[in-house]
Image: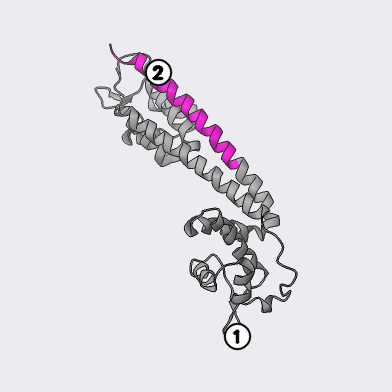
Amino acid sequence: MEHNPQSGKRLRPVDLAREHGLSTQAVRNYEDAGILPVADRTPHGYRTYTPLHAMALRAFLALVPGHGHATATSIMRAVNEGATEEALRLIDESHAQLLDDRATLRAVERALRDLKPLPSSAPRSASDRFIGSLAGQLGIRPATLRKWERAGLVSPRRDPQTGYRVYDEAAVRDARLVHQLRRGGYLLEQIAPLIAHVRAAGGPEPLEATLREWHARLAARGRALLTGAAALETYLRDGREQQPA
């Protein structure tokens, strides 16, 4: 975005920095990164900023919580270079990612809800849950369980005497959850972080708190995207008014 450095009030780097609790070096770094328009210089080489730069800094800092530092930087750089369409594309990608994350969360919740007790005929001893019996209970082939094991999604132990795979309660839980998510169309690489969530929580029941936190994080990100969009629109709109005719 072109600007007229002579228009409006002159600001020092410290003026921009104080408003947001930043260092003056951070403000200079933001200019060097293209987040702020290029500043005018005094005859002695000192940077001088205008209200346009202050708006650019506010827009960037509002974009960061929803888009992340790297994407927010790319958005502001595109805007300042006049590539508004590229900036809008980057914003659309962040919204699409949020939509995908919401769909993933819904899939996890459905999968956990659909986990039904094993048939009453299933052995109760963890040492009796061999690959054949577990595969039969899930309605899949043993080769599928081995594939999930290679992907790190299921971790059976080995019987020290026979070397056979033995699925304890946690491994059975993971296998059943993978099975539900695969039925929902999720790829193994998409399932891996979800299984990690379950393991970190200690099982589906403790995961309920994690799911609530996950919902809260997505909601906060959605609101942050709205806040960032509003600040960027202000910069785009008011910034044009400060450009020379």
Instruction: List x then y, in percent, for residue 109.
Output: 63, 50
Residue closer to the observer: 120 or 108 = 120
Q: Position of residue 35 (x, y in %)?
A: 36, 32
Number of numbered discs overlaid on the protein picture: 2
In the shown orientation, is residue 180 left or right of residue 206? left
Q: Is residue 220 magenta?
A: yes
Q: Which corner quadrant holds the N terminus?
A: top left
- Type of amino acid under label 2: Arg
Which of pointers 2 and 1 indicates the residue nearer the eye? 1
User: Residue visible at 50% across and 33% down?
Assistant: 225
- Callout 2–callout 1 Cβ contact below 8 Å: no
The magenta-colored residue range is 217-244
Q: CA distance from mark 2 to mark 1?
A: 70 Å
Q: Which of the numbered marks, if any, corresponds to residue 28?
A: none
Q: Quadrant of the C terminus?
A: top left
Q: Which residue is mark 2?
A: 237
Kindly identify the residue that appears in the image at 63 percent across and 45 percent down.
213
Magenta segment: does it hold 143? no
Q: Which residue is mark 1?
A: 160
Which residue lies at the image location 49% right of the left edge and 37% below the top edge? 66
